[in-house]
Amino acid sequence: MDYDDTGEGVKPRTLCEAITGARGQLNKHKAAIDLASEEANALIQTLDLETLRYLYRMVMQKPTGGKEPYELLYEILPAVMSPDRRVHRESVAYDEAFIQRFRNPQLRNRSFVSDEAIAIYLRSEDPDLVSPGEYCRINGIQGFSDIGLPLRRLIEKLRDKTELYIVTTTGINLICGLAAGFLPEALANGTSLTVMLPNQYSSFANDVASIESPDSAAIAVEDFAAQFEKIVSTLLRAVQQSKTIKGNERRGKVYVGCTFTVLRQTVTMGVSDDCEAWGWLSMTMPPARAIDGTPSFAFSGRTDTQNTASRVYRHVMELVDFAKSRNAFYELSEQTDLSTLHFGLEKESAQKYWEQIYQSAFNRTVLHSQYAGELIEVAAQHPLVDGKPGAEFQARLDFACELYHSLCASGKKAHIYVPGSVHHPDRCSLSEAGTRYLIKSGIPEENLLGDDMNRKYKGEDGVYNSADECYVSSRIFTDRQYGHLHVVCSPHQMLRKQLFYMAFGVLPYFHTVPCDMYAHNPIYELFEAVPDVIFRDHTWQDEHSVNGNRTRRERKPQA
């Protein structure tokens, strides 16, 4: 076979001919010919004439050591390819798949095998297995890589999608890159983005930091925290910028949610209105990061049929639903206050969060110590007994009465707040029953607070749980500028009330009153109520609060 010196290209019939690039060498390298396949021949044809000649010289000049020329090429090609994909800075036209075959050490000293041959082999070994090519065709997998996909390529694939999803450890470079120009324009044209992140101080983030940076894990965690803050602020700016761009009437939205302890991975996915999806998924294997080299693949397909795209989409939707159930999913708007965005907490993040809350409450309580006056809150207990406090409620009222007289005897002015709206099946409020009892015990009526405070601070919602009691009491304490707050409650409910008060910015003095039969179950408090306050719902005052709404629904009289 002769080379075409006109510059119009070359069409070698075998891999050996392509490597040697010389006339009359075919018989000399028959062993290489036998190992070559038509697939390799087709790929090698994409290399231009100058490149073939250059590779031939490299192979012929290298000591063979008993190796065939095609084996030598496996070693030479990666060395001569420069980072900008050129051979010694000369323009090269080649097929990426062909080059990847030479880079793969598992393919050295082996023939190129067709997908059909692999399928036949697999069926002989295990009838349940299919060939890689067949699997990819069925499931919409377009290709694999162990390097990141260029940003321009991602944008090209995502540009026609109306819903974008990113699941990542931080994804700082990706998100900042998208926000530089693509994201504001996409939002203006109706595309929405959902970003799922772990907690910045969570067990997950700590574990990733320890694996990636074992000698400086603490620094890495703080770096994570800084990246999370930058991500959210970057997304918020993108929302604001999109408002200045002329686009569709339907504007896209940006959501941020928490993945908690999800398997470490990165997903970038776009879905169009007709359910067509494209995505890029990296299964990160620590200590490597996705950008450092990790098995990754591109996929496409419909989300309403059984394929990889639908599986990944369903996985992302499950993460979103879980984040919503944990009150850890937010929409970013122009008015969003970043300081109010708190994901549900885990051990490390919870401790840091509550340390901050405690310090804030401590500072406010110290500030109030300059004021005169003492406020006593008596935790109410339902149901009443014939309109009167039951044994546990009565014990607390008796203790509050003694405390009141003790404070007054020391020269201090004291008020008692008895919380509690009308509970089912009672006919009067807990506040009314408690204040009547205290009046009979000798407490002046003008020093008692009850239903008037319930209505002032909770309105029609009423006071129906410990959180409501603490909220109203803390507002009274703050607004009326008392010097100290005393709380009289059951030993079993003290810890939860302590957390509620802390969240409302106050550190009271607690007085617990024992009795024979407690209304509060300590197991429920320790394993359900208290963890809920610590990790998820810190105040039970939000309109979507699960336990706040449940207790009000159970205790309010039916209309």
Image (cartoon, rainbow, N blue to C red):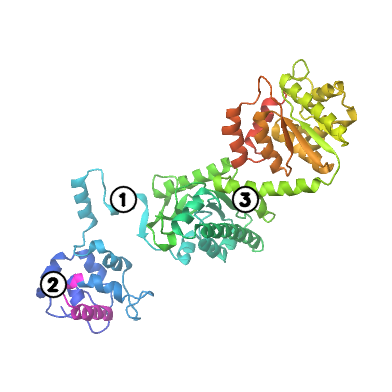
Other-residue count near label 2 (Cα within 10 Å), few / some / many at <14 / 14–19 / ≥20: few
| Between discs 1 and 3, the one toward the N terminus | 1
Compare marks 1 and 2 and give the one earlier in the sequence: 2
Q: Label 1 vs label 3: CA separation?
A: 38 Å
Q: Amino acid at mark 2?
A: Gly
From what the image shows, is residue 550 above or below residue 31? above
Classify 10 Å Cα crowding around label 3: few (below 14), some (14-19), many (20 and above).
Answer: some
In front of the other: 439 or 309:
439
Q: What residue sits right under mark 1 in the picture?
A: 135
Q: Residue at x 85, y 44 (%)?
A: 371
Q: Check the picture and name the quadrant holding the C terminus.
A: top right
Question: What's the magenta region?
Answer: 49-71
Secondary structure at badge 3 equals strand
Q: In the image, what residue type sits under mark 1? A: Tyr
Mark 2, secondary structure of its residue:
loop
**Tag 1–tag 3 contact (CB < 8 Å):** no
> To which residue does mark 3 refer?
331
Residue 260 painted magenta: no
Q: Quadrant of residue 534?
A: top right
Residue 148 appearing in the image: no
Mark identifier at residue 66:
2
